[in-house]
Amino acid sequence: MLYTVAALYRFTPVQDIVALRDVLLPAFTALDLCGSLLIAPEGINGTLAGSASAIEELLRLLNVHTGLLREDVKFSQADEKPFNKLKIRLKREIVTFKQPAADPTKIVGTYVAPQDWNALIDQPDVVVLDTRNKYETMIGTFAKAQAPNIDVFTEFADYVRTHLDPARDKKIAMFCTGGIRCEKASAFMRAEGFEEVYHLKGGILKYLEEIPPEQSQWNGECYVFDRRIAVGHGLTTGRYAMCFNCGYPLADNDRAHVQFEEGVSCAHCFAATSAEDKARYRMRQQQMGTQDTHDETHAS
């Protein structure tokens, strides 16, 4: 079966998140969808997969209940089931940032279409800013981009306050995987006094979907939060695997490293776990095989 994968988000007030979950969960289960949907008072965020007809019905339901528009969804395909199961989770935020001023419903940066992105980042006075975590930036980013080297998105606010200055850095062009983190990051930066803040509409995924390789300024692959691990131009599945324990993307040389053990550790997390931890992970691996535990969604 060929799976259609839909990465989506929408900032919209949800008055009763429990009621919305109770409507969507049985409907999505009946459609045999897999993946994750986060519901919070500020909106929805998810990556879900299923047959083409199931995804069409998913989009219809989300349009009815949240106003989600088809043109705001990023589509790709997978030859194998990209998630183990369906999860709908209730959250305080659809992407955790913990900055009350970062409210995309009140203020946000200027959207830039993928076709206009290259011209923007080629301008000499533009600071190109990658808002993603370091395990994502390590396998691919745009030329000339600053990577904040953060472990979690909540650290982005401190990076901005420490390394950037609205009096000096007049023009910011930021990007993330699917656009959602830039919604909050651009709202935050506007609230911090940065006046010209631009962000890539639809994120890296939309850029890789629409911009041909010969015109692209993207280097490497784009980390995604499903079993494909990474995608390239045309959203084709990339060459990376993933550490079952810590989630880091692993190239062939990483899997050949002496500290790599399937389901137990890699060079990135080997020192962070004890021998007892590794024994427990080894037992888990024997019992569960290589089931995916990294499907908590960030349309990003």
Image (cartoon, helix red, strand yellow):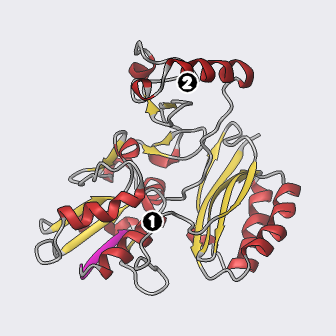
**Image spot of residue 201 (x, y percent):** 43, 69
Find the magenta span and give its range.
194-200
Q: Say which amino acid is labelled 1.
A: Phe
Q: Nearer the viewer, residue 23 or 73?
A: 23
Q: Is residue 104 left or right of residue 228?
A: left
- Name the N-terminal-most of marks 2 and 1: 1
Q: Is residue 80 above or below residue 120?
A: above
**Image spot of residue 96 (x, y percent):** 50, 63
Location of the N terminus (image quadrant)? top right
The crowding category of the residue bearing disc 2, from other C-alpha atoms within 10 Å (few below 14, some 14 to 19, many at least 20), is few
**Image spot of residue 132 (x, y percent):** 38, 54
**Image spot of residue 25 (x, y percent):** 82, 62
Residue 171 figure quarter = bottom left
Magenta-colored stretch includes residue 23:
no
Q: CA distance from mark 2 to mark 1?
A: 30 Å
Q: Say which amino acid is labelled 2.
A: Asp
Q: Which mark is residue 97?
A: 1
Q: Is residue 295 left or right of residue 159?
A: right
Q: Is residue 263 above or below residue 26?
A: above
Q: Is residue 168 above or below residue 233?
A: below
Q: Which mark is residue 277?
A: 2
Give SS at disc 2: helix
